[in-house]
Image (cartoon, rainbow, N blue to C red):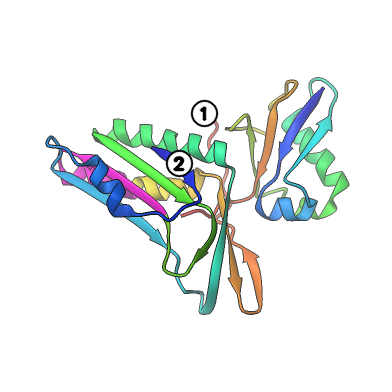
Amino acid sequence: MKVRVRLFAALREIVGQEEVEIELAPGTTVNGVWEKLVSRNERLGAYAKSINFAVNHDFVSRERELAPDDEVAFLPPVSGG
Amino acid sequence: MFEIVQDILDVRTIALQLASQSDGAIVTFAGIVRGTNQGKKVLFLEYEAYPEMAEKMMERIGKEILNTWGLSSVRMQHRVGRLNVGETSVVIVVAAPHRDDAFAACQYAINRLKRIVPIWKKEVFEDGEVWVEGPVETVEVP
């Protein structure tokens, strides 16, 4: 199955793309996608402890299992306002 | 009502939209781009949002404060893109029958926005730039 990953701020700059599509085995968790991304871009690893996870525009835990066409986002600590 | 925008924000215009005869108080908060941060001169800021989720989270905050403080109405707008020093980055306006509720709700809303709404700012200095990162926290999962 495919999921869409959205990237913002520092993570977007590290990867060099605003979004990527990733092909996954069914049952892959949000954390599984994160580990796959980190294996391609080691500098992302610095954010392992500070990011929050979102699926389809809601916060989720890293154990959340993904469904086809989900939109996943890895959110560095926010700084709006 | 809960929007990420590119254009200049005008707190007064938004506040006037909320005026009604049943409310004794309108409280506004405007966040302004400061010219220095930790002693360094800031040239300008670049704000970036995850727009769909940011609007959804602002709406969630709006519902929280409407219920908790019995407000009549609430508006939240956050600007993205390049903002110069002195410009308005965020506006929160709440209307309520009584001022105590309106003050409390407005303060809660900006504090909550700074924790859970996916927006980031980059500070650009004369000698470099940095993504500002707020405190690390695990946002509660609904």
Comes first in the chain, label 1 or label 2: 2
Q: Whole-percent x and y of residue A51?
A: 65, 46
Q: Which residue is mark 2?
A: B3
Q: CA distance from mark 1 to mark 2?
A: 22 Å
Tag 1 secondary structure: loop
Say above or below: B129 vs B121: below
Disc nearest the viewer among 1 and 2: 2
Residue beneath the point at 84% across and 39% down: A36
Q: Whole-percent x and y of residue A57?
A: 59, 32
Q: Is residue A78 left or right of residue A27?
A: left
Numbered badge on residue B142:
1
The chain letter for the residue carrying disc 1 is B
Say above or below: B27 vs B129: above
Query: Type of residue at label 2?
Result: Glu
Residue beneath the point at 54% across and 78% down: B40
Q: Is residue A42 magenta?
A: no
Residue beneath the point at 23% across and 46% down: B16
Start-end of magenta stretch? B90-107
Q: Is residue A7 left or right of residue B58?
A: right
Say above or below: A30 vs B94: above
Q: Is residue B96 magenta?
A: yes
* In the rendered image, residues at marks 1 and 2 fall on the same chain: yes
